[in-house]
Image: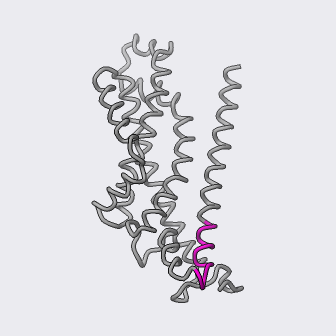
């Protein structure tokens, strides 16, 4: 059980649960930042280009995102992880394959709201190339909500990665993951509940902290927007 030397106790092999949680944090945040980075870049590009081009391309993208959103993202990720097999790289691929959709929808909506602004139309009239317009005039205006969305996505990916590892579809031993630590602890839940409660409490605290960070970031950006609009 917990002691002064191991304040979250030791597992069935005598390893410190606290040290394994620290090692698992590296894995969880590595996966989270990798997934969110890929999803953010991919979704933003698809969403902005879709809004800019319109027509058939926009119609296809909207229908594609609707298909993805018709199914729970975690179920699609589980299916993809099952097909690809366990491992950190495959977890990143599986979660990024479903994570880009939210960013694409948000980027498209934001781009549609700014593409007809005067400075954008002026850039078009001056003959600016499309990539330059999207990079210099559209992207800066849609970046703030996407950054906030990315912050919340980090928390979601941490939970999803823990869930996949708990099911045996994520990080494999000897590498540590919060989900796999909880899974191993469930076998001794009745005699050593700290093996589950400790990691679960840490996971809950981290996810809540990231969500609170997202809330604060969103509030600060909203305040700045109101100040500029005043």
Give me the residue at 53% from left, 28% from top.
141
User: Residue 95: where, in percent of width, then height?
Assistant: 40, 53
Q: Nearer the viewer, residue 32 or 127?
A: 32
Tell me if 30 is positioned left or right of 77 in this view: right
The colour scheme used here is one colour
Residue 196 on the magenta segment: yes
* Residue placed furthest toward the front: 190
User: Residue 99: where, in percent of width, then height?
Assistant: 42, 47
Tell me if 210 is positioned left or right of 63 in this view: right
Tell me if 230 is positioned left or right of 101 in this view: right
User: Residue 174: where, in percent of width, then height?
Assistant: 42, 78
Examine the rendered structure and indicate whether residue 226 appears above or below residue 33.
above
**Most common secondary structure along the magenta stretch:** helix
Give me the residue at 68% from left, 43% from top.
216
Examine the rendered structure and indicate whether residue 121 appears above or below residue 161.
above
Q: Nearer the viewer, residue 12 or 220?
A: 12
Which region of the structure is painted magenta? 190-202
Examine the rendered structure and indicate whether residue 67 appears above or below residue 191.
above
In the rendered image, the quadrant that contains the C terminus is top right
Residue 106 on the magenta segment: no
Give me the residue at 34% from left, 60% from top.
81
User: Residue 123: where, in percent of width, then height?
Assistant: 43, 16
Tell me if 111 is positioned left or right of 14 in this view: left
In the rendered image, the quadrant that contains the N terminus is bottom right
Q: How many marks?
A: 0
Examine the rendered structure and indicate whether residue 96 appears above or below residue 112.
below
């Amino acid at each position: 059980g917990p002691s002064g030397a191991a304040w979250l106790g030791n597992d069935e092999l005598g390893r410190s649960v606290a040290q394994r949680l620290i090692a698992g944090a590296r894995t969880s945040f590595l996966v989270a930042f990798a997934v969110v980075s890929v999803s953010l870049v991919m979704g933003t590009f698809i969403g902005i280009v879709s809004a800019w081009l319109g027509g058939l391309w926009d119609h296809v993208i909207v229908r594609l995102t609707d298909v993805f959103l018709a199914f729970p993202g975690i179920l699609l990720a589980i299916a993809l992880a099952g097909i690809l097999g366990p491992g950190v790289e495959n977890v990143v691929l599986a979660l990024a394959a479903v994570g880009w959709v939210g960013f694409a929808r948000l980027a498209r909506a934001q781009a549609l709201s700014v593409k007809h602004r005067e400075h954008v139309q002026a850039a078009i009239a001056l003959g600016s190339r499309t990539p330059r317009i999207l990079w210099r005039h559209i992207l800066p205006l849609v970046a703030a909500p996407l950054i906030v969305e990315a912050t919340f996505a980090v928390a979601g990916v941490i939970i999803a990665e823990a869930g996949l590892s708990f099911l045996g579809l994520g990080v494999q031993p000897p590498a540590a993951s919060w989900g796999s630590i909880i899974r191993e602890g469930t076998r001794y839940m009745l005699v050593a509940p700290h093996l589950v409660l400790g990691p679960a409490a840490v996971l809950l605290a981290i996810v809540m902290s990231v969500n609170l960070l997202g809330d604060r970031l969103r509030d600060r950006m909203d305040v700045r927007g109101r100040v500029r609009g005043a």
